[in-house]
Image (tube, grey):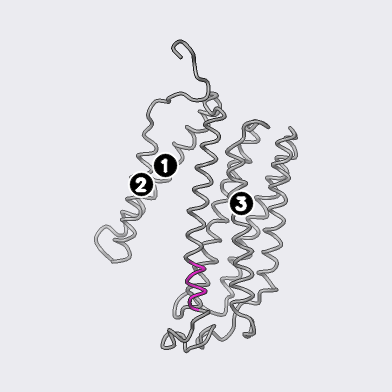
Amino acid sequence: MAGTKNHDYHILPPDIAPLATTIGAFTFTSGMVLFMHDLPGGHFVPWAGMALLLASMFMWFSKIVKEAHAGDHTPVVQLHQRYGMILFIASEVMFFVGWFWAFFDFSLFPSTIAEVIGGQWPPKAIEAVMDPFALPLLNTLILLCSGTTVTWAHHSLIHGDREGLKKGLWATVLLGMLFTSIQAYEYLHAPFGFGGNTYSSAFYMATGFHGFHVIVGTIMLIVCLVRSYQGDFTPRQHFGFEASAWYWHFVDVVWLFLFVAVYIWGGWGYPTH
């Protein structure tokens, strides 16, 4: 109706950050192709793309925080932000579907690629696998505890307990760092290297890609921790923290699948290191 004002949404001025992020991502991926094929520019283009990508993402996220402070994130906008985060996590799930698909394809049908893995799983080239009930089990408990602490922080925020929010975030960040440190130690003392056979490649791609997600999730929670000390987030408006918590729970669930499928089932009955 003419003369009325819709408070659910309004148009913001165009921003260059989304376009710069797209260009940075394209430059980085194209540069990686040059690097992997040892073509000219392969040692420069990926770094240039990564620098542009990180800078544009910082600009974009900073703008989003300023919009939140200005009151631009109405209930309709927050709903669409949640849809966007759900779709992002769904796209991340597809990455892990690929790694799990490869692992199960190799392990369930070893006879189809007998010339590569010797018709058995793990391949004959693997003398021992990781003991799932040593460091992997410890890391599982650490991630489960971190899921509890991030939930504690979320509930504290909802009930207006700022100190509980900070303590929960501190605990989650420290647990995430501990997980990464233990996984790095595990990799350094692994009984097999990255290449040479399908088991080690599938193992490192699945667990390493998950480890990368843990690092990203830890960085996201560190940003939330810094913002909590700045007075950001309210019980009614805290999408930045909520999105980080969703991402962290996603990382937890993926690790449970990895622990059961890759560590326990994938090396069942094989000598452990």
User: In the visual, does 19 lie left or right of 223?
Assistant: left
Q: Which mark is residue 76?
A: none
Q: Amino acid at mark 1?
A: Ala
Please say if the residues under marks 2 and 3 sit with CB atoms less than 8 Å apart.
no
Q: Which mark is residue 248?
A: 3
Image coordinates of residue 27 in percent, x first then y, are 32, 50
- CA gap, disc 1 to disc 3? 24 Å
Image coordinates of residue 102 in percent, x first then y, are 47, 72
N-terminal of the pair, mark 1 or mark 3, is 1
Q: Amino acid at mark 2?
A: Gly
Quarter holding residue 258: bottom right
The 10 Å Cα crowd at callout 2, few under 14, some 14 to 19, many 20 or more, is many
> For the C terminus, which image quadrant?
bottom right
Image coordinates of residue 61 in percent, x first then y, are 49, 37
User: In the visual, does 14 lie left or right of 247?
Assistant: left
What residue sits 47% from the left and 87% below the top? 111
Can you name the residue that lies furthest to the left here? 40
User: In the visual, does 172 lie left or right of 129?
Assistant: right
Q: Is residue 257 above or below residue 213?
A: below
Specify start and end residues of the magenta stretch as a single range. 99-106
Mark 1 vs mark 3, foreground winner is 3
What residue sits 62% from the left and 58% below the top? 253
The 10 Å Cα crowd at callout 1, few under 14, some 14 to 19, many 20 or more, is some
Please identify the dominant SS of the magenta region: helix
Mark 1 vs mark 2, foreground winner is 2
The residue to which callout 1 is attached is 55
- CA gap, disc 1 to disc 2? 9 Å
Please say if the residues under marks 1 and 2 sit with CB atoms less than 8 Å apart.
yes
Can you name the residue that lies furthest to the front here? 1
Dot 3 falls on a residue whose secondary structure is helix
What residue sits 47% from the left and 65% below the top? 98
